[in-house]
Image (cartoon, grey):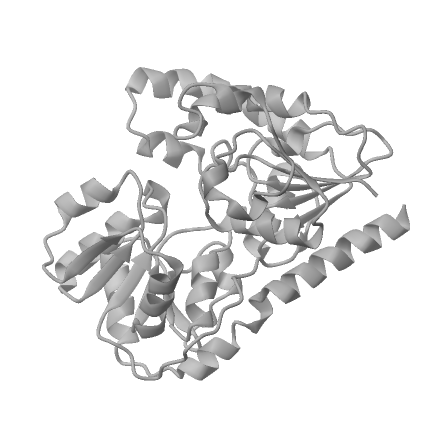
Amino acid sequence: MKIAIVTDWLNSKGGAEKVTQHIAEIYPEADIYTSIYKAENFPAFKNRKVYTSFINKLPFAHKLHFLYLFIMPYAFENMNFDDYDLVINSNWACSKGIITNVNTKHIIYMHNPTRYIWDDCHKYLAQYNVPKFIKFLAKPFLSKLRNWDFVASQRNDGIICNSSAVQKRIKKYYHLEAKVINPAFEDRKIKIKEKKENYYLAGGRLIPYKQFELIVRAFNQNQKNLKIYGKGRLLEKLKKINTNPNTEFLGYVDNKTHQSLLENAKGFLFPQKDDFGIVAAESIQHGCPVIAYKKGGVVDIIKDKENGIFFDEQNVESLNRAIGKFEKMKFSSKEIAKSSQQFTKQEFQSKIKAYIDNLLDEA
């Protein structure tokens, strides 16, 4: 059987890209297709055949891929999968629009209905620092892209998604049923520590919807110890608005440092509405409780007062109230770590393979 794995772009590594890598490990002979590929960021694909679209050669594609969103549908529709028996699509934007023949099974692992054009489109337009006339011109384009995206979503033989929250969005926007298979964290040897250090932790890609500005403003007010790791276009702004001498910006951290930070933190802050939230799963894997905004995929991960707590509104007052409650509670690091077992890579890969095998057997 000849297999291809397709994904929207591979220029930086985040949760969705980890899922793509975990799927690729199940099918080591599969070819990989994407619009943009920055090879040095994906050593795991060093010995794989990776095919890219013409967008990969365009100016600034590796850094500002969103500039080419308007031509990505064309790029994916012109990829040829006639020689493949099975195509597995790790999708969050335009890759769902590939066209396969009637004999090729196309299965989508959908991280979210395209965030830029559905429920978060107004927020995205507001957050991007571009002139108002560009935002105005973008609106009719997004309307057309929405129509294309709906049609493209129907071109599949089965859909898997990463959380119950995304399952609901797929039903609402695409009128399709999806099977939930939660993503996995990396398997690691973990030191579970009951005695924690006196700091809170937050981190990841420093981009607007992740709500790092909310965290910084909350800690400006409460003056507690905070460590933020990660890179992104918000870093300098976050440093400028910070007035808390106990807030530390760590920048990029390697895997070993990241692990140590999670093992020792008293709590991890997760204030965004995310499709799933693999970093929250990694936190409980390390026995670190999570303070999370009660929306999105994180509700599949956090059990209130067992491995973390929720807050209800994305504002400073709500987050600080949750932190106040959190500090009066006691958590068992070992019990928190046990609650993460459903998110192991072995569990994820076995469920993915079983779903695909079952679909192929029905053909």
- Which of the two residues, 7 or 57, is positioned nearer the viewer here? 57
The correct choice, above or below, for 153 with respect to 209 in the image is: above
Q: Position of residue 306 (x, y in %)?
A: 44, 78
> Which residue shows up at 65% across the image and 49% down it?
24
Q: Residue lying furthest front in this view?
A: 47
Q: Position of residue 152 (x, y in %)?
A: 67, 29
- Which of the two residues, 265 or 12, is positioned nearer the viewer here? 12
- Which of the two residues, 267 or 204, is positioned nearer the viewer here? 204
362 left or right of 309 in image: right
- Which of the two residues, 225 or 118, is positioned nearer the viewer here? 225
Q: State which quarter of the image contains the N terminus.
A: top right
Q: Position of residue 154 (x, y in %)?
A: 72, 34
> Which residue shows up at 16% across the image and 67% down it?
224
The correct choice, above or below, for 188 with respect to 11 in the image is: below
Residue 135 in sight from this viewpoint: yes
Residue 143 in sight from this viewpoint: no
> Which residue shows up at 56% across the image and 20% down it?
54
Which quadrant of the view contains residue 233? top left
Q: How many numbered circles are shown?
A: 0
Q: State which quarter of the image contains the C terminus.
A: top right
> Which residue shows up at 23% across the image and 64% down it?
320
120 left or right of 4 in image: left
195 left or right of 156 in image: left
The correct choice, above or below, for 136 with respect to 329 in the image is: above
Q: Position of residue 324 (x, y in %)?
A: 24, 72
